[in-house]
Every structure is written in C-alpha cells, then in structure tokens.
Image (cartoon, helix red, strand yellow):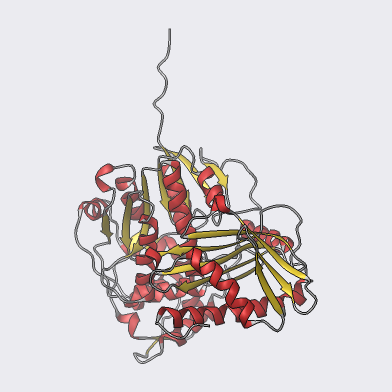
Amino acid sequence: MTHPEPPVRPRIAIAGTSSFIGAAVCRALAPRFEVVALTRSMALPMSDGGEGIEVRPCDHFSRRELAAALEGVDYAIYLVHNRDPSARLDQAQSRDMDLLVADNFAWAAARAGVKQILCRAPLGRGLQHDSARHAEEMQEVLRSHGVPLTVLRTGLVLGPGGDLSRLLASLVRRLPVIPLPRLAETKCRPIQLEGFLTAIRHCVGQPGTFGQAYDVFGPEAITLRWMLQETATLLGRPARFFSWPAMPRGLFLVLLRLLRPSLHPDFLAYLLDMFSGDATGQANPVERQVAQSWRPLQETLAASVQGTRPGSAVRSPQRTRDDEVLRQMRRVRSIQRLRLPEGRNAQWLADHYFRWLGTLMGLFIRTERDGAGSWSVRQRPGGLRLLELSFQPTHSTPDRRMYFITGGALARFLGGRTARLEFRDLLGGRYSMFAIHDFDPSLPWVFYRFTQALIHALVMKGFQGHMEQLAEGGPRL
C-alpha cells in the first residue's frame, strides 16, 4: 500500500532574526512554512535553529551570498536593522548601511525568484520625523528590483523580551524623579507582539496582499506617561514625574542613553519618533483581523515588564561571540552616501573619485588608471604602490562599479572574504553609495585606527561636500 506524499510546504526566509520580533516570527511561521533564518553571525555554527528552522549564514553586504541563501525560497520577510557592528571598525551611518543591505536583499530576492517581500514600517503617513523618511527610502529600495512588497505599518510592538520594556523598567528603577518632555503626553497606538504575528500570518503568501500597505494598530491609545505609571505599579515602585514640556528632545535622548548604554542611539531616536508622531491609522482587513484577538495592553505590559531584572543589560552569548570574531578578524567597513549630479551614475562617479583624490592629495599620492579600468594609488615621492584596485567587469554595470582590493602596502591578505570597493546608485540615481567591505589593514591596529582610518574619514567627508557642490551646480575641482 502506498502512502501519499505529505504536501510540500512553501519556504519562507526571514532576515533580521536576532531581535525579539524576528525570533517570534520564525517560531510563529514554522508550523505553516519551511522557515529559513538568514543570519549574519560568523560565530553561529551551521546547524538548524530548532523547531524545524533552517539557519543559513550569509554576509548581508554580499549580493551573491544573499542570492545563494535565498535559493528555493518562495517568500521573504525583511526585518533587518544594522545597529550591531559588522566589522571591527564601521565608518558608516547605520541608515546608509540599511539602504545598501536592503538593495542587496531586493536584488537577491529577484534573482532567486522570490514572490513576495514583507517588511515593517512606522505607522502614520505624511510624518516628517527621521524614522518615517528612512522608512520611505527603505521601501523604495526594497521595491526597486521588481519583487512585490507588502508593508505593515505599525507603532511600537510590545512583548516579553523587547528593549522597550527593559527601558521602561530602567527609568522607573533608577530615577527618583522622571522628567517628562512634551512627547510623553502624546497618544500612540502600540500593537502587541501577538497582533503583529497575526498580521504577518494574514499577509504572507497571500497574492491579494502583494504590493499593498496596511496600517496595523491597536484600539487603545496610550502615552509614555501611562506606560511609566503602569510599569511603576507593576514593579511596586513609587512613580514621581516632573512635567517639562520644554525639555529638549536631545537631552531626553542622552538620559535614555545613560540609563541603557547598550541600546543603539538610532533605536532610541526611533522610540522618541514613535512617541512624538501622534500617528493614526486607517481601518483595513488586516487591522480588523488583529483586533479580533486583542487583549488589554495592561496585560501585555505586565508580561513584558515583570520578566525584566535590575541591570539586565547583559549581551547575548551570540553577540559576545560575534564581537570577539570581529575583533580577531580586524576588518574595516566604510560606507558613505554621496549625492549625484543629475545625469551622472556610478560609472562616472568611480573615475571622478580617483581623479579627485589624486588632485586633493597630490603632494602625497598619485592615482593611475590602466587600460582595463583598474586603479592604483602610489606614494609620492618614490612610487610605492599603496593600494591596487582591480576593476571587476562581471560584477559591474553603469549604476554599480566594483573593484577588488588585490594589492598594495596598506592592505594585507590572509584569505576569507575579498576586500572590495564599490560605487552603487540607489534611490532612483539620486544618491550613490561609496562602500569599502572587508578591508584588512596592514598597519598595526591601534596605529591604523588613529592614522589611516582618520585620514580616510576626513577625505570622505571632503568628497561628500564636493559632491554636494556638484549636485547644486557649484564649482568643480
């Protein structure tokens, strides 16, 4: 007697699984999908993630590694935020890293035949704060390679294990009097973690949601003051508040940073944006689905806060191992956003940069281009080759120029990932990213950190200003 084959479950890849939201999404979708967790961790062994979850390590800054990791995947969820170190030295804004990784992911998803990408964005349309503008850029990039994008616009997500609950507990436990800026009185509509998971289950793999955006919010409007008052009650602490409407946002941000130094400044800025945005949403089928399983926020906050412990800022063992691996590898990543003049692209920018560099630092170096399009940087006087950058035509297009760092006295080569420099156009060609990946300096680390690295940072600051001038029609160098 033959037994019918069990139905093949669709495969879904989830990027950004180190957060409490990403980990919960993996567990929630495992009964229905073959879940692939994409991890950037170099310290994580190549084994499954438990509960039938397959773990695929890959470098999110490598298009080809991401494309290989997405092979055979039907749907993808993108929850990545580049707030953890990606190298021993990162010379980059986390938001620029976000855009570059999102472009890699969208390109790889298109190449692998992924049918849908789902991402999360801040709730509220027409908002002008930094988080909203960054989210708009991220969505533009994720759509740019043709894979249908589904966007879930949410406010804060509350649940056990989240950084917000730890921050609230720290404020209540450590401050005898809590100063409250104006944003503490603004009403917002958080969503419970289970509600967010319900929204994902409703949207992922459903063709009717492809290319759509949904506001996902709860029925309860609360304030930061209310959350702090409830947290104090749950922890059995007195709550003393000092209303200071004129308190500078930056000062409140510094206070939060002092209380929880392990939290990234961009995450804290995002929290303040969410509390100050007065975001409202529009009713829709996904929001109604979430409302059916709603339970009071007071219960969710209790479950979240009561699991915190005083001083519970200990880093995860995985993060500690990753940091040690990065320290031993002593690699450098440098990413800068450059504004492009109208009608220009990465192909033009690459040649312009090397010529500009040779002019700016003509007393110390000269730059030379060979017939194959490769560039070398040589010391002046003497002609010592400092860097050799080999053009890679198979990795390049007019809107992307790739150079492998293949020689020179300033670099060392011990195997592993190839050091490379790329110029890549993003956001419809309005900007281009200058990115150095996996560079291994030959100088002793401390000496490098305070000489070559500082010089590079100053040079790139100057080049950013130069490109702004060109984009505005200013003088050319």
Towards the viewer: 87 or 236: 87
Task: Give how far across and how far down residue 46 sits, in percent.
Answer: 63, 43
Residue 95's place in the image compared with 321, above or below, is below
Residue 150 in the image, given as x and y percentages of width and height: 32, 52
Name the residue at 45% across, 67% down. Answer: 165
Is residue 58 toward the left or the right of residue 105 in the image?
right
Most foreground residue, 62 or 4:
62
Query: Where residue 152 sits in the image (x, y, percent)?
Result: 32, 57
Q: Nearer the viewer, residue 304 or 387?
A: 387
**Residue 161 visible to the viewer:** no
Using residue 138 as the reference point, say whether residue 318 is left or right of it.
right
Quarter of image, res 402: bottom right
Snapshot quadrant of residue 453: bottom right
- Seen in the picture, residue 470 relative to 35 is either above or below; the reply is below
Indicate whether 37 appears above or below 183: above
Quadrant assignment, res 435: bottom right
x%, y% of residue 433?
A: 50, 67
Image label count:
0
Q: Residue at x 45, y 51 (%)?
A: 107
Which residue occupies the extreme top position in the image? 1
